[in-house]
Amino acid sequence: MSRWRSSSQHPGWPQPVGPLRVPAGLVRLRPVRMRDGAHWSRIRLADRSHLEPWEPETGVDWELRHSLAAWPSVCAGLRSEARKGRMLPYVIEVDGEFSGQLTIGNVTHGALRSAWIGYWVASAKTGGGVATAALALGVDHCFGPVMLHRVEATVRPENAASRAVLAKVGFREEGLLRRYLQVDGAWRDHLLVAITVEELDGSATAALVRRGKASWA
Ligand code: ACO
């Protein structure tokens, strides 16, 4: 039996997920924690031009929003949502180092059994399969321990790298959401993409391994 006992209200949380090996290193998902603040703030401030074109606005200035002092309330908010069973807020680690985040949100059980998924990877770690591995680990976790049936994501049509990541894991396009989110100074169209458990040939991580994109650690 696993040493991570998730509550019946929030199956699958707070277990870590992975690891999976890709060219960038060993990728693993683990819950966010208070002591992530220094890494989170340093990377998010340095990577503003890499991240800002793709992330929803909050009305708070980027520098202020990502200061070290901002992390405790950001982290507490994520963990509170996790305790209520609505979210699984993970850090993406590469070889044990904080390298980004993957968040599973709006977790709904009952007849819907659905959630959305989103992610970012530090620019220093991109191009080596990290996001693809993290997304595949997240999807397998959703369809396994979290017991979901559908996972969806939204992505700007211009975000070629993220669209490639979603396609590699098996997400298919469902439509275009017009002026869906306020991002980078304007209301931006987003593609809605999704995957249901029936569409996976066993598991997303196993499919990456079969295609030579990843290996078991
Ligand atoms: N055009 C087409 N394909 C591209 C481009 C481009 N300009 N740039 C990269 N790619 C491809 C790569 O070739 C690679 O595919 P391949 O393995 O078939 O060659 C793929 O995109 C990237 O795969 P990974 O290496 O797994 O991804 P990476 O770790 O580099 O992370 C990510 C990609 C998450 C998009 C990162 O660049 C990032 O954090 N960007 C900023 C934030 C962001 O866009 N987050 C996603 C928002 S949408 C969402 O969350 C659903």
Image (spheres, rainbow, N blue to C red):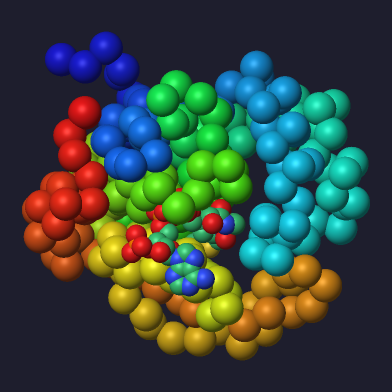
Looking at the image, residue 118 lies above or below residue 153 = above
Count the marks: 0
Going 14% across and 57% down the picture, which residue do you hit? 211
Left or right, 208 with reference to 129: left
Query: Which of the 4 image quadrants contains residue 32?
Result: top right
Left or right, 40 with reference to 208: right
Quarter holding the N terminus is top left
Query: Measured from the top left, where is residue 66 in percent x and y?
Result: 80, 39
Can I make out residue 152 in this image? no
Residue closest to the eye, 131 or 123: 123
Going 77% across and 69% down the picture, which residue do you hit? 184
Can I make out residue 217 in this image? yes
Left or right, 180 with reference to 139: right
In the image as oriented, which residue stretches furthest toward the top? Answer: 3
Quarter holding the C terminus is top left
Going 88% across and 44% down the picture, which residue do you hit? 63
Query: Measured from the top left, where is residue 114 in percent x and y?
Result: 36, 58
Going 37% across and 49% down the picture, which residue do you hit? 129
Query: Measured from the top left, where is residue 197 in percent x and y?
Result: 19, 60
Looking at the image, residue 213 lies above or below residue 125 = below
Query: Measured from the top left, where is residue 185 in percent x and y?
Result: 83, 72
Looking at the image, residue 145 lies above or below residue 126 = above
